Image (tube, grey):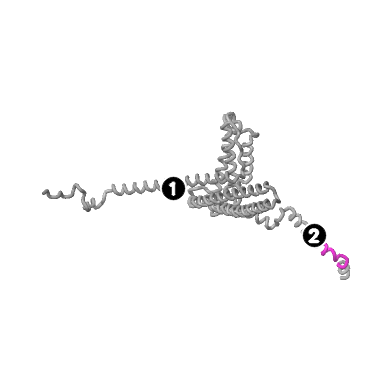
Amino acid sequence: MEPLLVLLTEWWWIGPAAAGAGTVGWIGVRRTRRRSLPAGATATGDRAARAWASRPMGKAAARRLELDSALLDLQNARHAVTRGRADVKVADAEVVRAQAERAASRVSGDVVAAARQRLIDAQRDLRAATAEVRARRAGVKAAKAMLPAIRSGNAPLPVARLLADHDAILARWMSYETDPGLAIDYPAMTDSGSPLLADFLRAHERAQWLRPASVHTRLEPAEYLAYRDAVRRTGHAFDRAERAARLGGEQPSLDAGDTWSRVASDLAETAQRALARSMESMGRAAAGQRAERAAKRTSAQAPDADGPAPRRPFWPPPARDRPQPPSR
């Protein structure tokens, strides 16, 4: 018993030291993992985000993605109108202040002119934001009109349609890269030094980076909007480059952030989609009417089992069947 007590007296520190070393090592590993994460992220939150992003998108969410994105786009456009109105008020106040200081001979007329120019710019931006709200409302109506067809399976999912549009643009571009005849006829479409082609390549790189891996990839409405806008900019840039190449000269490149051009393109695209849906609805209605008339004609020509129905007289009778008045 005494040797055991002596041993415990001399080696009692081994257990606490091992436990302390394990705790310190675990804390060091956890700090290393936390430092490797992005700023503001945690290990638990990062794992949850990756697990959520890896899940496929549900059917209901995939069908409503375009509508949800259109509603988010409309909300952003309304926020832009609110900011534009505030900017107009601030610019108007600056004009009044500059005019007062000009009346007191504190500033020159250039300051008043600059303040008025800022007011004009703010008013122009507000008009553009208001027009964009109208365009976004049309987009919401178009998305709502497409939802029944998507739910019934007569129209593709929004992501699938957007991927198809992107692939169509890439196919048009690759035709110039792979066809020797087109490359000879339109050398500007393969010249990397062309400014318009450079604009298209930059837009294409952005769209390719935002492109989802598949149709079932989970996308938030903001991510869908970013990819949709990137695909639209890519298509517009390619159209400008192709038009300039076929005309044999360079055309001025439009700024991708120009509000009026973006609103005009969105309105044109919305109008085209609405026209296509209207034509499709008219075609279905005409087909239904033709089928109904054919069914009525068939039922009218079919023989009755009980024989022909007796002819009923109607009143008033035709003029040729009326009795002649007595002659005087």
Give the prevailing secondary structure in the magenta stretch. Answer: helix
In percent of width and height, residue 99 lies at: 65, 51
Rendered residue at 26%/51% (across/down):
304
Q: Disc 1 marks which amino acid?
A: Ser
Residue 73 badge: none
Distance CA(mark 1)–CA(mark 2) = 71 Å
Let me know if residue 43 is in the magenta part.
Answer: no
Let me know if residue 14 is in the magenta part.
Answer: yes
Rendered residue at 12%/50% (across/down):
326
Q: Foreground residue, 92 or 323?
A: 92
Residue 24 badge: 2
Disc 1 marks which residue? 281
Rendered residue at 34%/48% (across/down):
295
Judging from the image, what secondary structure is the residue with disc 1 in?
helix
Q: Disc 2 marks which amino acid?
A: Val
Question: Which range is magenta?
Answer: 8-23
In percent of width and height, residue 68 lies at: 56, 53
The answer to whether residue 56 is visible is no
Instruction: Looking at this view, name the residue that lies furthest to the front.
Output: 104
Q: Foreground residue, 7 or 213?
A: 213
